[in-house]
Image: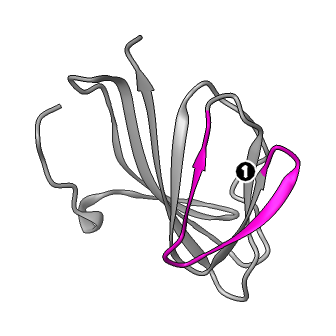
């Protein structure tokens, strides 16, 4: 992948029962085996998915609303303008903890090593 701009308005929206997802990037780069980036909107009171773990590192950046972040058995509130880092192999989950839809960006990467 080369340097580029990804316009939100040009990314297809996938609607789910719990909200929606826009996939921006899912490709290898010169330094990474895989780079993924998407924006998720979770409806009030919903979880984006069941808690899980994976071998990649991940950064969650909250754009609007509030999410409750489950990380290794404890929960922390993450509000708009804040972010959470999820280490590889760590159990985690996200649910909307606010009174309106919550939108957050996910940046996930896997190195070539």
47 or 9, nearer to the observer: 47
Q: Is residue 15 above or below residue 44?
A: above
Q: Residues within 10 Å of mark 1 (few under 14, many from 20)?
A: few
Query: In which quadrant of the rendered image does the C terminus lie?
Result: top left
In front of the other: 74 or 4: 74
Secondary structure beneath label 1: loop
Residue tagged by mark 1?
Answer: 49
Q: Residue furthest bottom?
A: 99
Q: Quadrant of the N terminus?
A: top left
- Is residue 28 found left or right of 76 in the rendered image? left
Residue at image coords 82%, 43%: 72
Which of the colour schemes (rainbow, by chain, secondary structure, one colour) is used?
Answer: one colour
Q: Is residue 28 above or below residue 74?
A: above
Residue 92, percent across and down?
74, 45
Corner quadrant of residue 19:
bottom right
- Residue range of the region highlighted in magenta in the rendering: 71-87
Relative horizontal placement of residue 113, taking residue 99 as reference (left or right): left
| Dominant secondary structure of the residues highlighted in magenta in the image | strand
Residue at the spot 79% in from the left edge and 45% down from the top edge? 51
* Residue 82 in magenta stretch: yes
* Place of residue 68 in the rendered image (x, y in percent of width and height, measured from the top left): 75, 67
Tell me what residue is drawn at x 29 percent, y 65 percent: 8
């Amino acid at each position: 992948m080369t340097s580029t701009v990804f316009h939100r308005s040009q990314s297809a929206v996938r609607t789910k029962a719990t909200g929606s997802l826009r996939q921006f990037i899912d490709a290898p780069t010169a330094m990474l085996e895989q780079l993924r980036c998407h924006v998720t909107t979770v409806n009030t009171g919903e979880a984006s998915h069941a808690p899980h773990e994976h071998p990649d590192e991940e950064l969650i950046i909250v754009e609007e609303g509030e999410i409750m972040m489950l990380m290794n058995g404890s929960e922390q509130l993450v509000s708009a303008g804040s972010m959470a880092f999820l280490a590889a192999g760590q159990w985690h989950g996200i649910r909307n903890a606010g009174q309106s839809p919550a939108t957050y960006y996910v940046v996930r990467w896997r190195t070539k090593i």
